Amino acid sequence: MKTRTFIPAVIALLLLSASVHAAEPYELLLSEVLVTPTEGEYIEIFNPNAFAVDLSNVYITDATYAPGGSFYFKIVTGDADDAGGAGGYYDFHARFPDGSSIGAGEYQTVAIAGSAGFFSVFGEMPTYELFEEEGTADAIPDMREALPGSIDFANAGLTNSCEPVILYYWDGSTDLVVDLDYLIWGSSSTVIQEKAIDKTGVTIDGPDAGSTPSAYLNDTAVSSQQHIVDSNGHTFGMSWTRIDESEGTETPTGGNGVSGEDETSENMNVTFAERTPSPNTGFLGTVGVSVADSSITEGNSGTQLMNFTISLTEAAPAGGVAVQVDTTDGTATSGSDYVAIGGVVK
């Protein structure tokens, strides 16, 4: 009697559509954050839309510190200390270069420590750098200060143990900013309380023509936010990578996002995972598929059924995963040793 081992060929197809459109604000996502090594620190963003998005009025910051009264949404007051990044907390509050844009389905990176350090780690250049770290301008566009003094050029960086990253839009004239995405990691509940975002009950007056403050809608209470819990310490050289572009169980209405989403309600502990860094390419929508080998003693007569276990490297995103599965000849020949199959498995 003979023993046959079959190794099926698996092909997963991912489709992207593309067109061009210009308007704002539109949904953008934080897709990856790297905090070690320091010279390679970066934040990656992703455009899930089928059109290009102008970034001229898009901001990114880690500058939130409740004990010091520093919150990104206070940018409308014009006070850099209140808006964060200028208070000596090794933070930054930055704005994308004027006229910059991100294409449909594109990933872009912001190198926190500068392009030279980024290149030394990854062998490629970032899309932007937080500031020019070498003193002489290079070809990589620098981020702008959100307000004068809002980037700590000497010390700005991401805190390894606990930090928020906020991506938001502001047109420069209204009382309220629009949340695009929000991520926070850490294990200390005390530090999370100091750095997390909750604009519930906040009213603020900005540069609009009137003097009446405008009110934010409720965010998710900090104690209920599902942040990334880094209780065992973040693995050196690994990134926090978005593995779910649908933003998981994020509340779609009643919040301060582009279409009313509550960006603080996302279950970040599920939609992000620790992964090998992949700057400028992202991980969105890419779920690895593996098929275990299977062996069977076929006998000299009759038909035997073989079972193959198909596994995903990540939890399936909303809508599930579909893969094309086909058999291919190895030690066995289709037609005489086995019945070939092919089709889509969901």
Image: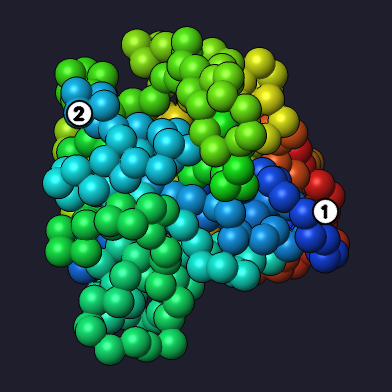
- Return the x and y of residue 296 as percentages of the image width and height: 59, 45
Q: CA distance from mark 1 to mark 2?
A: 61 Å
Q: Which residue is mark 2?
A: 68
Is 224 in front, or is 218? Answer: 218
Picture layout, residue 30 above or below residue 120: above
Q: Which residue type does callout 1 highlight?
A: Gly
Q: Is residue 87 left or right of residue 32?
A: left
Q: Quadrant of the C terminus?
A: top right
Q: Is residue 162 visible?
A: yes
Picture layout, residue 174 above or below residue 131: above
The answer to which quarter of the image holds residue 72 is top left
Is 333 in front, or is 10? Answer: 10
Which type of secondary structure does the marked residue at label 1 adopt?
A: strand
CB atoms of marks 1 and 2 within 8 Å: no
Describe the colour scheme in one phrase: rainbow
Q: Which residue is mark 1?
A: 342
Q: Badge 1 local density, few (<14 within 10 Å), some, or many (20+)?
A: few
Instruction: Residue at 62% x, 47% y: name it.
Output: 171
- Return the x and y of residue 160 as percentages of the image width and height: 19, 45
Q: Badge 2 local density, few (<14 within 10 Å), some, or many (20+)?
A: few
Disc number placed over residue 326 in the picture, else none: none
Q: Which residue type does callout 2 highlight?
A: Gly
Q: Is residue 312 visible?
A: no
